[in-house]
Image (cartoon, grey):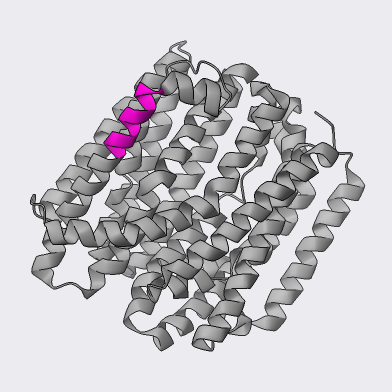
Amino acid sequence: MTSWIAEHWRGIQRDPVRGFQMFAVVRQATALLISVIVVKNLDLDEVGVFEVWMFVGMVLALLWLNGAFQSFVTLFPSMKPVDQSRFIGTTYLNIAVVTAALTATFLFFKEFLTDRILQMGTIPFLDWALLYLFLHLTASYSSYILLVKKRHQAFLPYSLVYLCAQITAVVVPFVFGGGLREVIYGLVFFAILEQLFLIYLVTRYGTWSISGRQWSQLSRLAVPLGLYAILGSFPQVFDAWLINWWYNDLEVFAVFRYGARELPGSLAMASSFGTAMIVILASNVEDGMNRLRTGVTRLMHLFFPLSSLLILLSPLLFKWIYSEDFILSAFVFNTYLLLMLSRWLFPHTLILAKKDSRILVLVSSLEMLLNISLSIFLIGYWGIMGVAAATVIAYIFEKLALVVITKVRYGLGLFDFVPPGLYFKYCIVLISAFIISVLLFNIPSV
């Protein structure tokens, strides 16, 4: 473990891919720390409101930003330097304009969307929350610019400033006796600083001009990739909606949302690693697959043991870190940790590098339908645990289906992505830990 950390730290100093991964982990860790701070300083129903804000942000990011960012890193490496500079500016204007339009639409129809569609009634301070989300989500573009420009030395200071600044934005209002209103004011101020840094990066590495050809090129690829992201993540949105609709209780919504997350850092590492590997695979498949397998092995050595340990300890940890109210969240969390079984398979990364996005949309559509169907069926039997189980089953189905497709289309099967012996041993350990946890602790009901 120590050698892995030392090696990864050295890698951050010289490799933008490692730096990009580090920032993604810091970003997720910051969100986790903020969730703890919020629980310790707000009532459970106010925690529910805060989680609704974050839920709306997830929806906004899915509608365009995820696809646009994936398109940017896919298209950038094959461009000439002069076109790359213009593409940085064009992409910024694209994500700013489209996200602003989506945010304005949500604001204009907020009563209809929150009351009729989301079934959440009036959301306090939603106007300010939407302003924060627009500034904060579009500012995520900064890390992608640093990645494609290979500014590896910038990731460490950027990550540290990001962590300290956002934590300060949340802590200071509580120190002075503030509540939800003051917290969202602090977050808006933090997001403005993020946006200023992004403008600096675009000015330094790009040009403030719009290329109609590049705008069209980005949008054409962003639509299927965005649709893939929506289909892949829609079950998370649907699950949260289903929990709120079924129980009609923001406290239950908060309990589910606090448990419906993976091991801190794992999703960030997986998504950032996959995104960065698109750039490499698009240039050289053979070299990219060797590096992919090496990186996956390293990540498995870290996250499988940690996940197994956390499954055994999470009921105690959630009670200590949060409160007695969140013990059920621990069992939801344990169920989501089973996503490790398929998290480190990256067939979709190879398919994205091949720009074969249509097949991703098809498979994700099937996964979405399976997830929704299972969630509706299992919530009646196992409550919020059933909803979590449906997500795990559907996600494993998607990854295995994509592995079969890569074998048929490109001749690359499961064992080209992971070392078989190590992978199956870790899977057995993880499943065993889950069974032991269920036997040791009683799962509370809602």
* In the image: residue 74, left or right of residue 438: left
Residue 307 visible here:
no
Most prominent secondary structure in the magenta stretch?
A: helix
Residue 36 visible here:
yes
x, y percent for residue 356: 42, 73
Residue sitting nearer the eye, 443 or 165? 443
x, y percent for residue 28: 49, 46
x, y percent for residue 171: 45, 24
User: In the rendered image, which quarter contains the N terminus?
Assistant: bottom right
* In the image: residue 302, left or right of residue 176: right
Segment colored magenta: 99-109
- The residue lying at 32 percent from left, 62 percent from top is 221
Compared with 363, 438 (above or below) is above
Residue sitting nearer the eye, 9 or 101? 101
Compared with 40, 88 (above or below) is below
- The residue lying at 24 percent from left, 38 percent from top is 195
- Picture quarter containing residue 401? bottom right
Q: Is 360 contained in the magenta span?
A: no
x, y percent for residue 391: 67, 51
